[in-house]
Image (cartoon, helix red, strand yellow):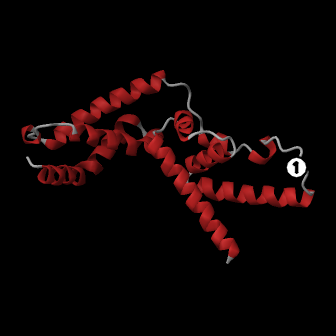
Amino acid sequence: MNPASRQRYIAAIERAHTKALRRFLLRKLGRGTINEIPDLLQEIFLRLLRVKDHEAIRNPQAYLITIAGHVIHQHLLEEEGRPETLDPLRHAEQDPVTSADDADLALDPAEQLEIAERIERVRRELTEISPRAYATLIMYRCEGMTLTEIGERLGVSHVMVRKYLSRAIAYCDQRLRDISE
């Protein structure tokens, strides 16, 4: 199979079976893992891409379910060995202003209140959109953690951390544009 037809074949399989795979993963892992589903789907299709002879696959759906079973098994093994992950909602509730070591920067109490109110409003709105995006933003900007460290704490891939951070930054940029208009 030439590379172009192989790519079309994989894309057709992905379009035809992604929803069924998503349902399968949710059924096997439960709703608590809904944020991990994109990573697991990506791993399934990456494994499909590694297959050298796609013509040998007679039933793509059965083959994908088999791969999904292996991915789930590996995921569960990794979860057992992984230290307890951070609950982003609990982390997001911590006030980054009060936890910072900025005692030397004495602000006017009215300014402190205004900053705290703004942060609370952004926290509330951003956690409604994506709690993990907010937690990622706090860990990255306030705690100075790397994307890899954040991924380890949240229990997600580096790619997902980048997506969460991008989502949070885009949200903040939009809020700044709204305020300046």
Describe residue 80's horizontal placement relative to residue 112 as left or right.
Answer: left
Depth check: 136 or 20 in front? Answer: 136
Residue in the picture at 34% in, 31% down: 72
Above-or-below relation of 172 to 19: below
Above-or-below relation of 167 to 74: below
Residue in the picture at 62% in, 39% down: 145
Q: Quadrant of residue 55?
A: top left
Depth check: 147 or 13 in front? Answer: 147
The residue where tag 1 is placed is 105
Above-or-below relation of 116 to 40: below
Report x, y in % for residue 112.
Answer: 86, 56
Depth check: 83 or 72 in front? Answer: 83
Report x, y in % for residue 151.
Answer: 52, 38
Number of numbered callouts drawn? 1
Report x, y in % for residue 162.
Answer: 50, 48
What is the crowding at mark 1: few (fewer than 14 residues within 10 Å), some, or many (at least 20)? few
Describe residue 21's horizontal placement relative to residue 135 as left or right.
Answer: left
Q: Please name the amino acid that badge 1 sits on.
A: Leu
Residue in the picture at 21% in, 37% down: 50
Report x, y in % for residue 61.
Answer: 18, 43
Residue in the picture at 33% in, 46% down: 22
Image quarter (top left, top right, bottom left or bottom right) of the C terminus: bottom right
Q: Quadrant of residue 34?
A: top left
